[in-house]
Image (cartoon, grey):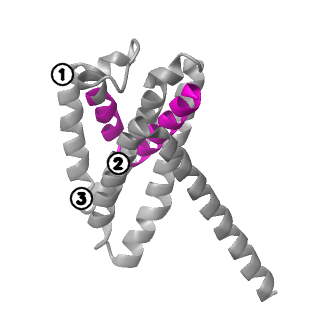
Amino acid sequence: MELLTGILSAFGLAASAGLNAYIPLLVIGVLAHYTNLVKLSSPWDTLANPWILILLGVLVIIEFLADKIPAVNHINDIIQTIIRPAAGAIVFAASARVISDVHPVLALACGLLIAGSVHLVKAAAVRPAITATTGGTANVPVSMAEDLIATVLSILSVVIPILVGAFICLVIALIIWWFWRRANAASRVK
């Protein structure tokens, strides 16, 4: 059971890194430094260093602000194309419960793919569609929602990872339902 909750936690943290690279890093660093909820093994325990926590806090603020300024948000997404998958790899591998049972290279690759996929959907599909349909007026509220989702998902991934698993199942079910509905609608048109 511990392996399952560890993997669910790692998946949730990596997915939230796809929305905001620094929030899950800060969350696991703060939780590792101030609580017993997260136990980071070396070299990931560096995330709990007070100086690293301060740096991550500054980076969270910078990304938060950069994502709210028109035109700068698109430049930020380009820059974050490298940073978010790397952050996802780090948070996935840093999960102490997973790293002891899963090879570090596999953990890094999983985190990279998960965060990279979430970021790609956000930066290449969702954000451009929102910008095009609203003339950019919805970018700030959507960005704030993304930051909120990244924060809540990061915290829930550590505190209640089984809830993250249930959420993943719900999202997969909704995607399957959407594709099934779309296929049925296309077959009726023919």
Q: Residues within 10 Å of mark 1 (few under 14, many from 20)?
A: few
Q: Residues within 10 Å of mark 2 (few under 14, many from 20)?
A: some
Looking at the image, can residue 83 be seen?
Answer: yes
Residue linked to disc 2: 152
Horizontally, residue 5 falls left or right of residue 48, namely right
Quadrant housing the C terminus: bottom right
* Between marks 2 and 3 in the image, the one whose residue lies nearer the viewer: 2
Q: Is residue 13 positioned above or below 31 on the image?
A: below
Mark 2–mark 3 Cα distance, whole angstroms, equals 19 Å
Q: Is residue 184 positioned above or below 110 on the image?
A: below
The first of marks 2 and 3 along the sequence is 3
The residue at 44%/33% (across/down) is 86
Residues rendered magenta in the picture: 1-30
Quadrant housing the N terminus: top right
The amino acid beneath tag 3 is Lys
Residue linked to disc 3: 68
Mark 1–mark 2 Cα distance, whole angstroms, equals 24 Å
Q: Is residue 184 positioned above or below 44 on the image?
A: below
Overall secondary structure of the magenta section: helix
The numbered dot on residue 51 is: 1
The residue at 48%/25% (across/down) is 93
Residue 97 is inside the magenta segment: no
Mark 3–mark 1 Cα distance, whole angstroms, equals 26 Å
Q: Report if the CB atoms under discs 2 and 3 are less than 8 Å apart.
A: no
